[in-house]
Image: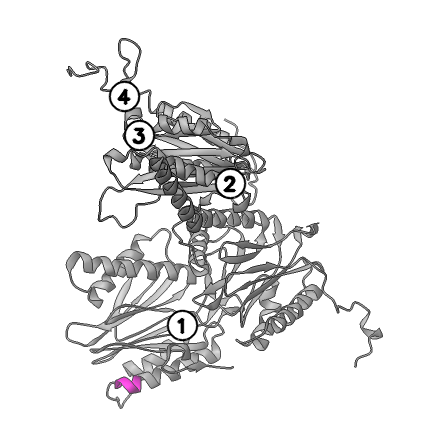
Amino acid sequence: MDAPITRTLEPINTGTSVVGITYKDGVLIASDTLVSYGSLSRFRSIQRLVSIGPCLIGASGDYSDFQHITDLLTQKVDEASFHQDGFQYTAPELFEYLCRVMYERRSKVNPYWNRVVMAGSKQGKPFLGCVDLYGTHYASPTVATGYGEQLAQPILRKEWHPDMSLEEAHALLEKCMRVLLYRDCYTINKVQFARIGLDGQTTIEPPAPLTGTRWEAPLTITLP
Amino acid sequence: MSHGLGSGYDLSAGTYSQDGRVFQVEYAAKAVENSGNAIGIRGRDCVVLGVDKPRVSEMLVRAAPKNATLSQNIGMTSAGLVADCRTLANWCREECRSYKNQYHTEIPVRVLSERLSLEMQEHTTTSYYRPYGATVILGGFDEDHTKPQLFMVEPSGKSFGYRACSCGMNQSPARTELEKLDLPNLGAEEAVMTVARILHQIHDESKNLAFELELSWACAATGFRHVPVPPELLARAEEAAKRFLEERDHA
Amino acid sequence: MLTPAVAPIEAKKKEWSPYTDNGGTTLAIAGPDYAIVAADTRLSNGYSISCRDVTKLAQLTQHCVIGTAGMQADRAVFHKLLRTRVDYFKYKYGKTITPTALAQMIANILYGHRFFPYYCFNVVGGLDAQGHGVVFSYDAVGSYQALPYATTGSGAQLLEPLLDSHIAQRNRTQKNPPMSKDEAIAFVKNAMASVSERDIHTGDFLEIAVITREGTQIITREADGVERIKLGFD
């Protein structure tokens, strides 16, 4: 008898929120380094932000699917570079490709169980896009996946402005990550930031704990 | 039935001649000998690949590249039917990709040469195929970057590892020159100069065909990636090669 | 033969729906010498707003615009497909497809996907050969109809009676003359603003495509130049 066709009907090893914003000279994104197995904090030091050719990607959802997507995109970028004709994909082009891949899989009712954030630049301006497991996609100066969409996005929309400096952008994302650390069960205090400049230069910062979090019982806190 | 050279035994790769030859394969080798020359050198911690591209027309602005990057660390050059060479380059790229997909490791050059040789050999066994009219030189590094690798695969499917190899119209004079080299002590830049020199040297001037030189390399300076030789170095190498020829002619 | 007394227990199958509804409202009006197609730009995801600035309109020819509510991912490929089909028509027949022909083609494409439908709820607006406005309204599987006005999407139920009253005017004792183009634009702005008050999936910005003999003008967001139409709250 033929084995039944199996599909991802629920994600297994999952990563939680990724948040991202554009700033004056590029795009900054952040996530924690936890990959959960159900409610078990299974892998505590996994990098979920990856640099691929002209862009930076990060994802929440199934980690194995994300690894596969990373491979697909890397392959695409490499393939183009081997021809040595100077052609390089831009971030929006790669994003469109990723959207088509995500939509193709949802149309086979066998989705990549992720929400992927992609950062890069487009004609000298920062580019930040997001695509989910249905192929729903959009570009926006502020993006947040997972619980970040409920908890971080309102903060980002309120405080973001187009000519933020890197320091301001960093502070804003730290604030969001702190809120998520307080309220999202599936997160740990080991957070990673990565940025991509308008020149395509990527910097992935080493993971570090957030500072300034407070865990005392509320009664013992003296408000300023 | 044909009454030519092969007396009818040369019409298909699926038929032996009475004295045990497969003429189609030999004709494929002839196709390689009708084309420009390609050279590969394995020096000290480097591989250099070079090819001369005949200028087929005075109106040609620039010939299409012939050296191909197959994976990050592996490149190829070739002699023979240009379209066959391209097909094989793409075939190799696909092989590199699928290997990396399966093992998350770059394909070792030896493995690639073995697979390519199988593919080319298969085209010598049935009447359905025409053997590839191309000889391919594969050069580069394995993922550990320890040792430069160089292989040459011929239309028959023959594949060997070399310290230096050549194919094309003037493969024998080229080999004579290559044999004179102190290969284990040849640095990357020196190897580039040498390949340029030999390609100029073996060029048949009586036929008065202009040609374009293409060089690519993989070495520590390129981070062990296979890339075209930078234009500045290429120009310097060509200039030195031409000077060498002039001095030789004066002497 | 033995028959089991109890039906075998089947493991409950997990399922995943390949569909999602991203909300949004479209509106189209056919005037005597114009047509209007309008839609908001909100992209909803459940109770969240994923993005405030995603267009639902696509201009397919000089005199034809489609507006699509429903699932954004399906809409993106559907609009992409229509654009190529419009190009193909031109290559094949040497002329631009008319809104009426395009309307039938859209129905055929939707019906072709009868058993795995595009989750798209379309309105199409354009001008016919005489220069009169035409509007077509669709369901997801290609059932369609030419109408004087149409609305689809999450706010359609709120809009429909308003359009019945102001455009069709069937139960009015005193009937107003048909709206001029400018009156219609003003009406669309008011109507969509009203919908955005009560439908959480509709809002943020409004895009209005105004189709006249001269061509199509899209009154839209600040970024595109003309006018910023903000719906609802800041």
Amino acid found under the numbered disc labelled 3: Met
Mark 4 residue element: helix
Distance Cα–Cα, label 4 vs label 3: 19 Å
Distance Cα–Cα, label 3 vs label 2: 26 Å
Residue topped by disc 3:
B169
Among all residues in the image, which is located at the extreme right? Answer: A220
Amino acid found under the numbered disc labelled 1: Thr
* Residue B116 picture location, percent across and down: 42, 29
Residue topped by disc 2:
B188
Task: Check if mark 4 and mark 2 are on a common chain.
Answer: yes
Residue topped by disc 4:
B24
**Residue interval drawn in magenta:** C179-184
Amino acid found under the numbered disc labelled 4: Gln
Among all residues in the image, which is located at the extreme top? Answer: B18
Distance Cα–Cα, label 1 vs label 3: 71 Å
Q: Chain of mark 4?
A: B
Mark 1 residue element: strand
